[in-house]
Image: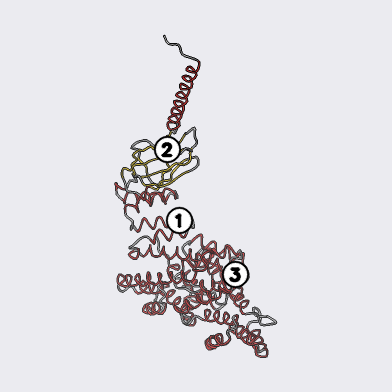
């Protein structure tokens, strides 16, 4: 046997150690790869629906760098921190089976991937009608999240389902998320086939237009709403005329709601104003006269019924409206006393305006709130609260509601324009002018719109533009105290102190109670006084639908 020296044994030992170290390295590398463990909460073949959160538990003794989530081999999300999860909106993907993959990468860029099949099942296979019914039921139960879930499912099956889109819009409107409410209906291609959906859209768009962060787009959005409302009511008017046949009152109401007050008057006149005419017919006829500015004829219709004690709550409400428009506020409240006890919503709204004009703001707010609680869909009640409320936030919210529900009465628009002026922001004056232009486009004879325009021009030192408007105002109402004060402001702005003093004397003689200034007020201050205190041209109104509500 050959003997080996010490050197040989040392070399053999070194070789053995190298082999052992290499083996350990390879074993460690294999263990590092094997150490990535991925555990999913979902199992092969599980069904998912709506918005599903998919959680992956990933373990590695080397630390995890990132986790990728794929659907049908398309990278959808990469997460770099615990918990590793992916929120999958399944509404955006087709129904049926999909490959869901999770790939984890450790700090050494070693990766591991796990695939499973998941099945999207949003119940659409059973028919959209069934899903839509669940959405409606959830809305009725005020379970808004469930309603949203079923609406989204139904709209996946039928993207142009108007009723489902309306439910979704209603849910977001309840949350005051006007942008999403508008979006719910904007996606519907055939919305113009549904008047209710178009009315919803007009309401949501107006509410969105009035959001503080939408100031730059305010007037353009309001203009779009105005066009939409005209489109709605013109088509609706045609349909009602065709269906109503010889029902003069129904046709008159359709004209009235469409802002065609002269045409409504012509229809109501056909019924007549004789002793044999019914109270509903006379109330409508008198209302049309008041709305078109003929208070004298309205009085001739209403007074005989009042004197003979054959009046009713509707007749008294219309009479009170006429009294308010002629600044007889105390008389209006006295007339409405019986109907306030009976909690008749139009009477409550009218009393709110009268009380506000008399300085009884607390009482006015109580009347307005009662009117809203009894008739939440009455635009007049919300406008009354906007006029009456001393809390700015309450007043602004009520004004937004009135503007959103209103159609073709211009009081809320001009009231809102006056409020814009008070901000004294130069960029808002053009907006206020645009609003008065919109009113005059639809109601060319509106004196309050012309007066506001004149005051804006005076503030901007555009005396010549203001003069044209003031001449028109004086031709129509030469002795009205508010217009006489506007004349005073005009001369003061022009620098004609003598005529300004003469005009101020004329105002004091005409109405010493409300116009007792010792000096002409600045234009914007006068506009604010007219809007908030004098309430001479609030543009308050009544609708036939409010006077004679349809029973559901």
Residue at 53% in and 69% down? 350
Give the percent coordinates (x, y) of residue 498: 67, 90
- Name the residue that disc number 2 marks: 111
Callout 3: few (<14), some (14-19), or many (20+) C-alpha neighbours within 10 Å?
Answer: many
- Of residues 363 and 241, the one nearer the viewer is 241
Q: Where is residue 286 in the image (x, y as percent from the top left)?
A: 45, 77
In percent of width and height, residue 19 lies at: 44, 24
Which SS class for mark 2?
A: strand
- Mark 2 to mark 3: distance in Å? 74 Å
Q: Is residue 284 visible?
A: yes
Q: Where is residue 352, by image quadrant?
A: bottom right
N-terminal of the pair, mark 2 or mark 3, is 2
Q: Name the residue under label 1.
A: 172
Q: Which mark is residue 356?
A: 3
The Cα–Cα distance between marks 1 and 2, rounded to whole angstroms, is 44 Å
The secondary element bearing badge 1 is classed as helix
Q: Which of marks 3 and 1 is nearer the N terminus?
A: 1
| Position of residue 124 in the picture relative to residue 274 (left or right) | left
């Amino acid at each position: 046997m050959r003997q080996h020296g010490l050197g040989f044994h040392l070399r053999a030992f070194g070789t053995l150690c190298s082999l052992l170290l290499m083996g350990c390295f390879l074993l460690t590398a294999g263990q590092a790869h094997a150490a990535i463990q991925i555990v999913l909460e979902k199992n092969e073949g599980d069904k998912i629906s709506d918005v599903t959160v998919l959680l992956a538990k990933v373990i590695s003794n080397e630390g995890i760098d990132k986790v990728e989530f794929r659907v049908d081999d398309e990278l959808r999300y990469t997460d770099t921190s615990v918990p590793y999860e992916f929120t999958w909106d399944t509404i955006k993907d087709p129904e049926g089976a999909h490959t869901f993959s999770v790939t984890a990468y450790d700090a050494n860029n070693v990766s591991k991937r796990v695939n499973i099949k998941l099945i999207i099942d949003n119940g659409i296979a059973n028919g959209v009608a069934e899903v839509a019914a669940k959405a409606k039921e959830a809305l009725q139960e005020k379970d808004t999240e469930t309603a949203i879930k079923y609406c989204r499912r139904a709209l996946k099956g039928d993207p142009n389902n108007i009723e489902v889109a309306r439910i979704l819009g209603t849910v977001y409107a309840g949350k005051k998320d006007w942008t999403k409410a508008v979006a719910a209906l904007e996606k519907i291609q055939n919305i113009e086939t549904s008047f209710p959906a178009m009315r919803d859209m007009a309401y949501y768009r107006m509410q969105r237009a009035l959001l503080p962060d939408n100031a730059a787009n305010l007037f353009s959005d309001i203009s779009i709403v105005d066009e939409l409302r005209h489109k709605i009511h013109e088509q609706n008017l045609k349909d009602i005329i065709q269906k109503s046949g010889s029902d003069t009152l129904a046709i008159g109401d359709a004209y009235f709601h469409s802002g065609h007050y002269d045409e409504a008057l012509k229809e109501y006149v056909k019924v007549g104003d004789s002793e044999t005419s019914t109270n509903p017919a006379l109330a409508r006829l008198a209302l049309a006269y008041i709305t078109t500015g003929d208070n004298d004829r309205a009085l001739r219709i209403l007074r005989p019924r009042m004197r003979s004690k054959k009046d009713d709550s509707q007749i008294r409400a219309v009479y009170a409206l006429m009294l308010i428009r002629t600044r007889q506020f105390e008389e209006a409240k006295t007339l409405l006393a019986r109907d306030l006890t009976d909690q008749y919503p139009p009477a409550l709204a009218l009393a709110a305006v009268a009380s506000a004009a008399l300085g009884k703001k607390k009482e006015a707010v109580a009347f307005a709130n009662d009117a809203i609680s009894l008739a939440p869909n009455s635009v007049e009640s919300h406008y009354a609260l906007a006029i009456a409320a001393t809390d700015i936030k309450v007043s602004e919210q009520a004004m937004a509601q009135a503007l959103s529900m209103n159609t073709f009465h211009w009081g809320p628009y001009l009231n809102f324009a006056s409020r814009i002026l008070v901000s004294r922001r130069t960029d808002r004056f053009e907006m206020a002018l645009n609003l008065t232009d919109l009113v005059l486009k639809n109601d060319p004879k509106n004196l309050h719109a012309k007066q506001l325009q004149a005051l804006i021009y005076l503030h901007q030192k555009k005396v010549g533009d203001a003069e044209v408007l003031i001449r028109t105002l004086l031709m129509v109402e030469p002795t009205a105290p508010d217009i006489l004060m506007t004349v005073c402001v005009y001369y003061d702005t022009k620098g004609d102190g003598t005529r300004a003093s003469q005009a101020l004397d004329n105002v004091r003689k005409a109405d010493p109670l409300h116009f007792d200034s010792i000096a002409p007020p600045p234009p914007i201050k006068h506009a604010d006084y007219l809007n908030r205190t004098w309430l001479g041209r609030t543009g308050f109104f009544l609708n036939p639908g409010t006077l004679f509500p349809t029973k559901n």
